[in-house]
């Protein structure tokens, strides 16, 4: 496996020879920032076009997903993001140290209605969406962390997507996980399984939930499908609506369709 120092050196060399003209922002875990055009994801590596070389040719570099903290798609690269829509992208990067707290919020007293948050996009031109696939782990990592363990740090799986306030997201999910004690759940959750410690007390136990940002308690119940508009900027995390995640096993398969480009609404 390549070390991040090698990737960083390669990127610095490329950047010294060309002038960036695109604005996807790739932040590496060593603090480096790359600005280019994300064009592919394969074998756990992102391929990024950088600058505008001689005769219109552009340099490219590949970065391992485990070395990336986050990727922010800029509105100037709508076409590039759209080209990712049919790629088989899979994120299995480890979560950053800073994670949303698994504290119990106040009971959700909102009335049941359509699963839509925020305003809807205007009825003008149809928005373009790009796709990211994520495996959401049902089990919370033990402390200290065991390298062979398949789990979510602090109970949250980092999607790797940095969303903008006003950005529309369409999320679908599938799969089946064990909640321990002979109980199983799908992303829709189990309404007959009581749990006073789950984050969303009025929603089904074991269901798929999400949150934007690692300092936010505004948890969102996703279930098998939900469309919503982000109410703030931040990294998108996924989790399981259950109080005890230590005896869980399995994953949910999540597909994120994120609106590309455009100005925040």
Image (spheres, grey):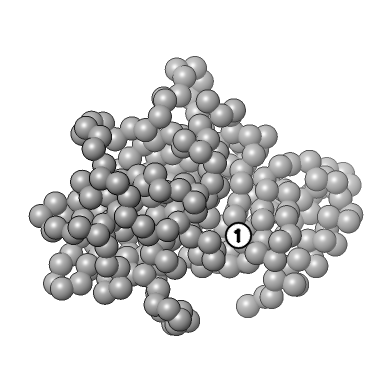
Residue occupying image coordinates x 50% and y 64% = 95
**Residue that label 1 marks:** 69
**Does residue 87 appear in this view?**
no
Pinpoint residue 200: horizontal percent, then vertical percent: 27, 49
Q: Residue furthest left?
A: 192
The image position of residue 182, as x and y in percent, is 14, 72
Residue sticking out furthest to the top: 124
Image position, residue 54 (x, y; %): 89, 47
Q: Within the image, what quadrant is residue 24 found in?
A: top right
Does residue 101 sit above or below 81 in this rendering? below
| Quadrant assignment for the N terminus | bottom right
Asked whether, in this view, residue 202 is left or right of residue 18, the answer is left
- x and y percent of residue 161 in the render? 53, 50
**Residue toward you, 54 or 22:** 22
**What is the secondary structure assignment of the residue under circle 1?**
strand
Q: What residue is at 35 percent from the left and 44 percent from the top?
A: 220
Q: Is residue 223 left or right of residue 24?
A: left
**Residue drawn 22% across the image and 68% down it:** 178
Dividing the picture into quadrants, the one containing residue 150 is bottom left
Could you tell me if residue 100 is visible in this image? yes
Q: Nearer the viewer, residue 72 or 237?
A: 237
Foreground residue among 263 and 234 = 234
Q: Residue at x 16, y 55 (%)?
A: 190
Q: Looking at the rendering, which quadrant does residue 155 occupy?
A: bottom left
Q: How many badges with numbers are in the image?
A: 1
Dot 1, how many residues are within 10 Å of its Cα: few (below 14), some (14-19), or many (20+)? many
């Amino acid at each position: 496996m390549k070390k991040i120092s090698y990737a960083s050196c390669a990127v610095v060399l490329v950047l010294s020879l060309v002038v960036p003209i695109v604005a996807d922002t790739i932040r590496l875990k060593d603090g480096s920032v790359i600005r280019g055009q994300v064009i592919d994801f394969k074998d756990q590596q992102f391929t990024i076009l950088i600058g505008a070389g001689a005769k219109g040719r552009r340099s490219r570099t590949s970065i391992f997903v485990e070395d990336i903290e986050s990727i922010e798609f800029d509105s100037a690269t709508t076409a590039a993001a759209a080209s990712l829509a049919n790629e088989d992208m899979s994120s299995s990067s480890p979560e950053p140290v800073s994670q949303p707290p698994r504290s119990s919020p106040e009971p959700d007293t909102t009335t049941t209605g359509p699963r839509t948050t925020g305003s809807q996009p205007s009825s003008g031109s149809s928005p373009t969406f790009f796709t990211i696939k994520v495996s959401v782990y049902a089990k919370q990592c033990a402390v200290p962390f065991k390298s062979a363990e398949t789990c979510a740090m602090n109970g949250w799986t980092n999607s790797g997507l940095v969303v903008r306030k006003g950005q529309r997201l369409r999320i679908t999910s599938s799969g089946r996980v064990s909640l321990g004690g002979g109980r199983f759940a799908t992303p829709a959750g189990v309404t007959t399984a009581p749990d006073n410690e789950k984050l969303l007390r009025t929603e089904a136990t074991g269901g798929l939930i999400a949150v934007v940002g690692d300092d936010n308690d505004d948890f969102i119940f996703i279930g098998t499908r939900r469309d919503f508009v982000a109410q703030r900027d931040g990294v998108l995390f996924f989790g399981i609506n259950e109080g005890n995640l230590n005896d869980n096993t399995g994953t949910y398969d999540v597909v994120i369709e994120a609106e590309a480009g455009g100005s925040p609404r």
